[in-house]
Image (cartoon, rainbow, N blue to C red):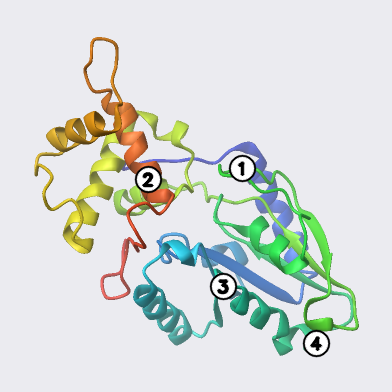
């Protein structure tokens, strides 16, 4: 996946708009996917500001690894919250920075596509205020969401922004992780879906102890997996593209258990 790029036109517009909105905000949140915290962290999104890091989809990540990543970000000077539990959200709503912000405080929420920004905003706002979806690109323009966390006596607003990719080449390691967690739409790596599935399966075998009884050869592994799932083409042959897609989907839905794809002990490029 070396040389991969994805930067739709609405993201270019959102990137320009974000600079204007950020200049008027007092609080900043950067969501990262807890399964790939470093790969989904782009401090350039809020250059000049120190955002609060929120781990999204933490219920799908390995808890001990999330804790280690939390400490890693804290050592860089960031405040960190894991958003999968209601207790964590309540803690976020009670934090003193809401009260310390000036009246009619505005907070900007940023992150890569499909990382969970709109879902977090809806949880904080106590209702379905921002559009959500299972594919990247649902939020097409900035949305101001009004809320009053922690019983604040002032108007508070969260700005939901479209997920933004920077127009730059991604390293192979970062690209397959972003594809695996769903940040990159599958249609944009369709020709390389087998590569992503193989990297994901080999990582799970090596680091998580999964698929130990499966064939070491990935083609044979995919054939066996496809047969078990009934992913067959006409004539009874395994549809390897569908098998690779299902393999990735199973991971994204948490069917392999709680897995984190990178470690703070071995930073990714």
Q: Say which element carries label 2.
A: helix
Q: CA distance from mark 4 to mark 3?
A: 23 Å
C-alpha gap between disc 1 and disc 3? 25 Å
Q: Which mark is residue 145?
A: none
- Residue where numbered disc 4 is placed: 99
**Residue under the point 13% across and 53% down:** 212
Q: Residue at x 90, y 80 (%)?
A: 154
Of the numbered discs 1 and 2, the one sitting upstream in the chain is: 1
**Label 1 environment density (alpha carbons within 10 Å; few <14, some 14–19, many ≥20):** many
Q: Is residue 232 above or below residue 17?
A: above
**Residue 136, image x, y percentages:** 56, 44
Horizontal side of residue 155 vs 223, given as left or right: right
Q: Which residue is mark 2?
A: 250
User: Of the residues under marks 4 and 1, which one precedes in the sequence?
Assistant: 4
Instruction: Measure how far apart labels 2 and 3 are at the Cα level.
Output: 22 Å
Mark 1 or mark 2, whichever is nearer to me: 2
Q: Where residue 28 sits in the image (x, y, percent)?
A: 67, 72
Front label number (2 vs 4): 2
Secondary structure beneath disc 1? loop
Residue closer to the observer: 247 or 32: 247
Secondary structure at badge 3 equals: loop
Q: Residue at x 26, y 70 (%)?
A: 266
Residue 252 lies, in percent from the top left, at 42, 49
Circle 2/circle 3 CB separation < 8 Å: no
Quadrant, the C terminus = bottom left
Determine whether the residue tagged by mark 4 lies in a helix, strand or loop: helix
Q: Earlier in the sequence, mark 1 or mark 3?
A: 3
What is the CA distance from the residue labelled 2 to the residue labelled 4? 42 Å
Whether label 2 touches label 4, CB < 8 Å: no
Crowd around label 3: few <14 · some 14–19 · many ≥20 (10 Å): few
Q: Which residue is mark 1?
A: 137
| The label number, if any, that marks residue 85 in the structure image | 3
């Amino acid at each position: 996946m070396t040389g991969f790029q994805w930067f739709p036109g609405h993201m270019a517009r959102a990137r320009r708009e974000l600079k204007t909105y950020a200049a008027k905000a007092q609080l900043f949140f950067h969501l990262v996917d807890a399964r790939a915290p470093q790969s989904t962290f782009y401090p350039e999104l809020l250059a000049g500001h120190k955002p609060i890091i929120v781990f999204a989809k933490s219920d799908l990540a390995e808890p001990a690894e999330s804790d280690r990543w939390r400490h890693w970000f804290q050592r860089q000077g960031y405040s960190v919250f894991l958003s999968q539990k209601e207790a964590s959200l309540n803690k976020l709503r009670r934090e003193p920075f809401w009260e310390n912000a000036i009246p009619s405080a505005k907070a900007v929420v940023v992150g890569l596509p499909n990382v969970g920004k709109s879902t977090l905003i809806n949880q904080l706002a106590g209702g379905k205020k921002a559009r959500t979806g299972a594919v990247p690109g649902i939020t097409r323009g900035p949305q101001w969401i009004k809320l009053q966390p922690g019983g604040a006596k002032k108007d508070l607003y969260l700005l939901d922004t479209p997920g933004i990719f920077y127009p730059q080449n991604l390293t192979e390691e970062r690209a397959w992780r972003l594809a695996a967690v769903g940040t990159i739409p599958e249609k944009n790596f369709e020709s390389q879906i087998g590569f992503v599935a193989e990297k994901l399966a080999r990582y799970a075998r090596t680091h998580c102890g999964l698929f130990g009884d499966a064939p070491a050869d990935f083609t044979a592994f995919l054939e066996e997996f496809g047969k078990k799932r009934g992913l067959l083409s006409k004539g009874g042959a395994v549809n390897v593209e569908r098998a690779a897609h299902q393999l990735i989907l199973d991971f994204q839905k948490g069917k392999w258990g709680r897995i984190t794809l990178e470690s703070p002990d071995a930073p990714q490029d």
